[in-house]
Structure formats: structure tokens, C-alpha cells
Amino acid sequence: MFRLRPLFVLPFLAFLLSTTAHRIEIDPGGKECYFENLQPQDRMTVTYEVGGSSGGHLDIDFYVVEPRGEVVYTNFKEPQGTFSLTAEVAGRYTYCFSNEMSTYARKVLSFNVHGVLYVGDDEHIAPVESEIRDLSSGLQMVKDEQAYLVVRERVHRNTAESTNSRVKWWAIVQTVILFSVCAWNVHYLKSWFEVKRVL
């Protein structure tokens, strides 16, 4: 019977699946670029979502450049997105988030990067290693979904608070207008009757 050794599993999981999560702010007219060094058959996935903006729309430009300098993916003015890539050549793969289309709004962006390193032909790996790969992939999907839900909750909370603030101030303005109109009506009617008495 094959016994699974923890000393084998932990390094393999660390090697198989690497994940990073980031939250950044991008100034108006600016962009942020990052890169990953990949070998042929390595897989990389980037998921992102704009979680806040100092005015304007919740959108961002996203593009990926391969080591030869060719743009392999673009996604313009979208609030969120997912991109997966299997490397064909070894080298530095650059992905950028651009806020250059905005002249005044700063964007708050959350993004996750994860990848699976190519470790050989799937037919020649042990069943335990295959199960570990599946488990790692499922775990990553759960983490990505959780990160997505956190960002969505933040966006909806900010929207609800903004709406609540606008409704409050609109109610205050309406109340002030109502009392002002009532005061003016009372004053006008009072002055009208005073004029009538004098006549």
C-alpha cells in the first residue's frame, strides 16, 4: 500500500500551484503592469474586478503581452474579467491594467493571479499526484470565488451607502423647500389680508 508522505505533498502543492492576490489603486491616466516568467505549457490565469472609483465608471482596460512583444489579449472598459493563458514560448508574460482613458477618476482594482506549472505528461504521473492536482485546482476555484464575492459585497455596500446618502440629503432639501414655501404662503396671505383691511 502506497503511503502519502507530508514532506512530499507540501512541496508538490507549492510547486504545482502558485497564487497571489492584490489590491491596487490606479491614478487617472496611469497604468500598472506586472509580469510572470513562464515555461512552455505553464498555465496562468488572471481574474480582476474594479471595486471602487473616485467618480466615473467602474471600468478598466486590460491587456496581455507575450515575450516576443505581441499583444495576445485585450479587454477595454470592462468592470471585471478573466483571462487564461497556456504559454507557448518561455519568457516574460506581461499583463497591464490601464486607467489612461480616464482624466479624473482613480480606480481601485482587486486581482488574483494563479497558475499551474507543467510537470510532465499526465499519463506518467501517480494517481495520488493527479488527485492532488484536482484538489488544488478545486481549492483555487473556491478561493477565486470567495475573493470575487468579497469585492462584489464591497461594491454593493458602497453603492448602497452612496444611495442612502443621496436620499437623505434630497429629503433634507425637500423639507427645507416645503417649509420655505409654507412660510412664504403664510406671509403672502397675511400681507394680502392686511392690505384688504386698510382698503
Image: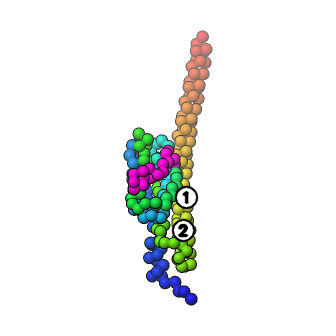
Magenta residue span: 64-79
Type of residue at label 2?
Ser
Q: Residues within 10 Å of mark 1 (few under 14, many from 20)?
A: few
At which x and y percent is residue 192?
59, 18
Residue that sits furthest to the top in the current view: 199
Instruction: Report if residue 179 lies within the magenta region.
Output: no
* Residue drawn at point x = 48 percent, y = 67 percent: 116
Residue closer to the observer: 154 or 142: 142
Real-space Cα separation, disc 1 to disc 2, in angstroms:
18 Å
Name the mark on residue 137: 2
* Residue drawn at point x = 47 percent, y = 64 percent: 41
Residue closer to the observer: 93 or 61: 93
Q: Residues within 10 Å of mark 2 (few under 14, many from 20)?
A: some
Of the numbered discs 1 and 2, the one sitting upstream in the chain is 2
**Quadrant containing the C terminus in the rendered view:** top right
Mark 1 or mark 2, whichever is nearer to me = 2
Residue closer to the observer: 105 or 169: 105
Q: Is residue 135 above or below residue 110?
A: below
Residue under pointer 1 = 149
Chosen colour scheme: rainbow
Q: Secondary structure at mark 1?
A: helix
Q: Secondary structure at mark 2?
A: helix
Residue 24 sits in which quadrant? bottom left
Most prominent secondary structure in the magenta stretch? Answer: strand
Q: Is residue 153 above or below residue 143?
A: above
Q: How many marks?
A: 2
Q: Is residue 96 visible?
A: no
Residue closer to the observer: 48 or 117: 117
Residue 95 sits in which quadrant? bottom left
Judged left or right of residue 188, residue 103 is: left
